[in-house]
Amino acid sequence: MHDYSLIWLIPFFPLVGFIVNGLLGKKIGNEKVIGAIGTLAIAASFVVSCKMFFQLLGDVEKTHEVILFSWMSVGQLQIDWGFLLDPLSALMIMVVTGVGSLIHLYSNGYMHGEEGFYRYFAYLNLFCFSMLMLVLGNNALVMFVGWEGVGLCSYLLIGYYFEKKSAGDAAKKAFVVNRVGDFGFLIGLFTLFWALGEHGVWTFQFTKIAENAHLLPAGGVVVTVATLCFFLGATGKSAQIPLYTWLPDAMEGPTPVSALIHAATMVTAGVYMIGRMNGLFSMAPDTMMVIAIVGAATAIFAASIGLAQNDIKRVLAYSTVSQLGYMFLAMGVGAFSAGIFHLMTHAFFKACLFLGSGSVIHAMHHAYHKAHLHDDPQDMRNMGGLAKKMPITFITFFISTLAISGIPGLSGFFSKDEILWWAFSSTRGGWILWLIGFIAAGMTAFYMFRLVFMTFFGKQKTDARAKDHVHESPLVITIPLMVLGLLALVGGWVGIPAALGGANRFEHFLAPVFEHAQETYGIHSQHSLHAFEFPLMGCSIGIALVGIFLAWIMYVKNPELPGRLVARFRWLHTAIFNKWFVDELYDGLFVNATKRLGRYFWKGFDVPVIDGIVNGVGWLVQGSSRVLRFIQNGQIHSYAMTMVLGMVVIVAVYVFK
Amino acid sequence: MITVNHYLVLSAILFALGTFGVLTRRNAIVIFMCIELMLNAVNLSFIALSHHLGNLDGQIFVFFVMTVAAAEAAVGLALMITFFRNRESIEVDDISMLKW
């Protein structure tokens, strides 16, 4: 019999790290000690996660619930602080603590010498705690605590450089946009709660929800509305259309934060949530269709914006939005394990890409600092030729780029191809979804190689004075890069599909979580289409190579070609470069409208009515007391006089009645 | 023949005089004396009515009033002396420190 009772240690260690660094960090002051506390806290929970993971791997029973203590108890409703360990959450804790540990280690080098070093590590640990609560919670309320916690940490870390106005604004934007999504999550949760309550099941517990989901009519209004609301929550947290605008701005935060929160873990919370409630989502084909369409649209839309950005981190940000779109596409067509598979491989290669870009930015910043220049260290137009200067960064970055572009043999290929295959062949899919994903894959290959060529190839375009100061980053930065690069290379091998002679062990591992819903609601890849599997695979390899080739022509062979193309298609470039003016559209539609409404209530309601009532009461009291003041004059004689007169009146009334 | 009405009218006149004095004068000692006058006017009507009705209750009441008046005189005069020592005045208008 396996024992999982120590599972609470996993979120506990980062919480301790947060408390120690948060309360005592300023007093400790020593960067090495603070960094060690933060990194060891998450590394310890990685060790526990490994133990739990391998224990689960060898266990027959795949779903374990550990109740820590009762949180609240109202009537029949019993809510616990409990943990749920099944293949899905086991995988997530491995990703969160594994990638998290590497990024903590990396941060030791990257954040060296920053003011508020302890603050950074405290927030980072708090984030890990919240994220682990999110993925481990056995009921939706504990998940919601984590859900809000990661949102808070995201806000705090985006605004880490809070003395910069743009960082503060980006943090606020992320928070407000996420609130819109959280609202959806809550409404969905309560809809579900009451709907199940009607049938006498009052619960937030995932296992019980799954057990009793059949009480609700499949495809009915209640299930559709609840899942759509949940999906709204997912679009907020996971940066999908229409709520994706916060993620590119979130790049104002330190780069390791972008890697951990805005690429590997937090933004995948929405995908995880859908995976966690896959039974419910499977019951609502309409919602699934919406998810698939939104995912595909986001994938291609964000990829198109990524084509023309010049800020290295922004390209990666749009790439993240686009890749998250793939995951939602997978969830939407019922390929839950493919979506989670892509979540995992994406965590590896995107974290590596972000950390690599951080290494580049770190080097550029350092060089500019040495040369006393104030150029933008994130602008790719100032880079070029860094491959020789920073070989380790280059190699790991290049591997990850190959992975994300879908080159056969690397992790991204297996996961992305599985998604595209399901999009094409699933009973809930269609060839249009495949086509959109297919084009987006070509765009991905193009913009990623554009980034690599602009940054690492060609002549070094850095200012001559700073040129020679560009150096490879220290080991503490390159070790995480190497580990993640290796994972980006081999991480996909656990999910090699049967068609390629693999066993797809990944899918079998997750099967206990997803299989039931897929079987019950008839979600599978259609047998009549299996002949297409290899041709489609060939197509996606082909378009990746086309994308790479185009990038090579435009940014290596004929470096003046992009300029000519821009001149030729000026309107298109303007639209893409300005992110299709979505921010401006939202500003006009929502932000300014809200501001105007607020202004109207201020000038039209608050000032005349509310203030009017308050001030009116004041005036009334003042006015009446001005009259009454004459009576209370403090003259004892007039008081006595009044008394006597009063007495005379009373006596007169008595006598002459 | 002097009837009870004569006494009552005299008492009323004395009481009115006392009241008038209390209301108009500013000197604390004069006010004090006026209050004594009012008390004694009341005593007069008590005695007169007691005699008229053949009931001793009124006369007992008068003893009480005189006792209270004596106590009042002792305390009141002490206050005035203390106040005069501090302010060199016993005008009631000067006793206004608690007014805002």
Image (cartoon, rainbow, N blue to C red):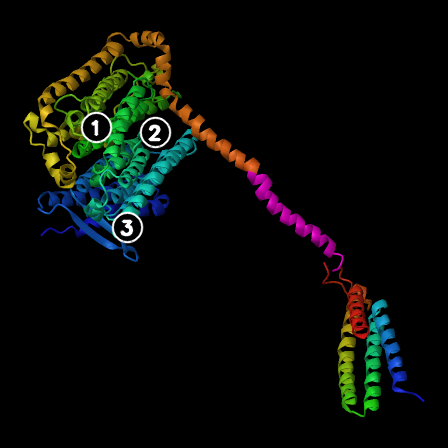
* Circle 3: element type: helix
Label 2 to label 1: alpha-carbon separation: 25 Å
Q: Residue at x 21, y 32 (%)?
A: A331
- Amino acid found under the numbered disc labelled 1: Phe
Q: Position of residue A153 (x, y in %)?
A: 34, 39
* Circle 2: element type: loop
**Left or right, residue A597 beside residue A293:** right
Q: Residue at x 21, y 49 (%)?
A: A208
Asked if labels 2 and 1 share a chain, the reply is yes
Q: Nearer the viewer, mark 3 or mark 1?
A: 3
Q: Position of residue A279 (x, y in %)?
A: 20, 40
| Crowding at mark 2 (Cα within 10 Å: few <14, some 14-19, many 20+) | some
Q: Who is closer to the viewer here, A47 or A21?
A: A47
Please name the residue that numbered disc 3 is placed on.
Answer: A197
Please give the chain letter of the residue carrying mark 1.
Answer: A
For the record, the magenta segment spans A605-632
Is A656 rendered above or below residue A162? below
- Amino acid found under the numbered disc labelled 3: Gly
Q: Which is more N-terminal, label 1 or label 3?
A: 3
Give the residue furthest to the left: A501
| Crowding at mark 3 (Cα within 10 Å: few <14, some 14-19, many 20+) | few
Residue A349: give its label.
1
Q: Nearer the viewer, mark 2 or mark 3?
A: 3
Can residue A30 be seen here? The reply is no
Please give the chain letter of the residue carrying mark 3.
Answer: A
| Crowding at mark 1 (Cα within 10 Å: few <14, some 14-19, many 20+) | many
Is A146 rendered above or below residue A79? above
Please give the chain letter of the residue carrying mark 2.
Answer: A
- Amino acid found under the numbered disc labelled 2: Pro
Q: Which is more N-terminal, label 3 or label 2?
A: 3
Is B50 rendered above or below residue A385? below
- Can residue B19 be found in the magenta stretch? no
